[in-house]
Amino acid sequence: MLTTTVCVALSAAGLAIAILTAYRRRYARATRIAAFALVPVGLAMAGLAQLGGKVGRAVGDWAADLVFKPTVWAGFAVLAVSVVLFMIARVAGRRTGRGAPQGTEGRPGVEPAASAPAVGPGRKAAQPAPKAKKGRSDGLDDFEDIEAILKKHGI
């Protein structure tokens, strides 16, 4: 009941300020003030102001328990252990190489190259990229290619 009264008083004060602002011929600002002034009474009518009070009391009770109850501290310790175990599992998963096919690491008779895709008949295997000439960087090789194209076109 008190919450509703406070909300109505806040809205009434806001609407009074909006009327004074409109009297000064600042209608856009007065409209904005009136919109904000109606928020407290709307929250009270919808029951959200009381809900906010209950949430505030619940947070206060939890904070008091945090200070005075050792079981709350033990709960945080359990959560910390859970996070550490999760991180260990992620690191261990990355080190085992999840991308490798399962079961081919330790089986006799299966070689790693056996799972490579076969090149069909009539196709040649991909050639490795030509190595850069000694004494020149890769950037100069690009310029040589461009120069050859320009010479080919007579430029």
Image (tube, rainbow, N blue to C red):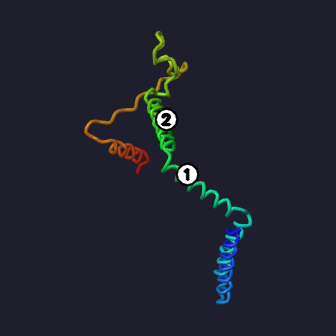
Most distant residue in the top direction = 109
- Could you tell me residue 120's position as x and y percent? 55, 20
Q: Looking at numbered disc 2 in the image, what kind of residue is underneath it?
A: Phe
> Which of the 4 image quarters holds residue 54?
bottom right
Q: Nearer the viewer, residue 72 or 84?
A: 72
Callout count: 2
Image-based side of 87 in relation to 133, left or right: right
> Which of the 4 image quarters holds residue 30?
bottom right
Q: Residue at x 64, y 83 (%)?
A: 17
Question: Considering only order in the chain, which callout, 1 or 2, is on the residue closer to the N terminus?
Answer: 1
Q: Nearer the viewer, mark 2 or mark 1?
A: 1
- Could you tell me residue 47's position as x and y percent? 72, 62
The residue to which callout 1 is attached is 62
The residue to which callout 2 is attached is 86
Most distant residue in the bottom direction = 24
In the image, residue 58 above or below residue 95: below
Residue 23 is labelled as none
- Helix or strand or loop: what does disc 2 sit on? helix
Q: Nearer the viewer, residue 34 or 103?
A: 34
Q: Looking at numbered disc 1 in the image, what kind of residue is underneath it?
A: Trp
Q: Nearer the viewer, residue 144 or 81?
A: 81
Most distant residue in the left direction = 135
- Helix or strand or loop: what does disc 1 sit on? helix
Q: Residue at x 68, y 62 (%)?
A: 50
- Could you tell me residue 83's position as x and y percent? 48, 38
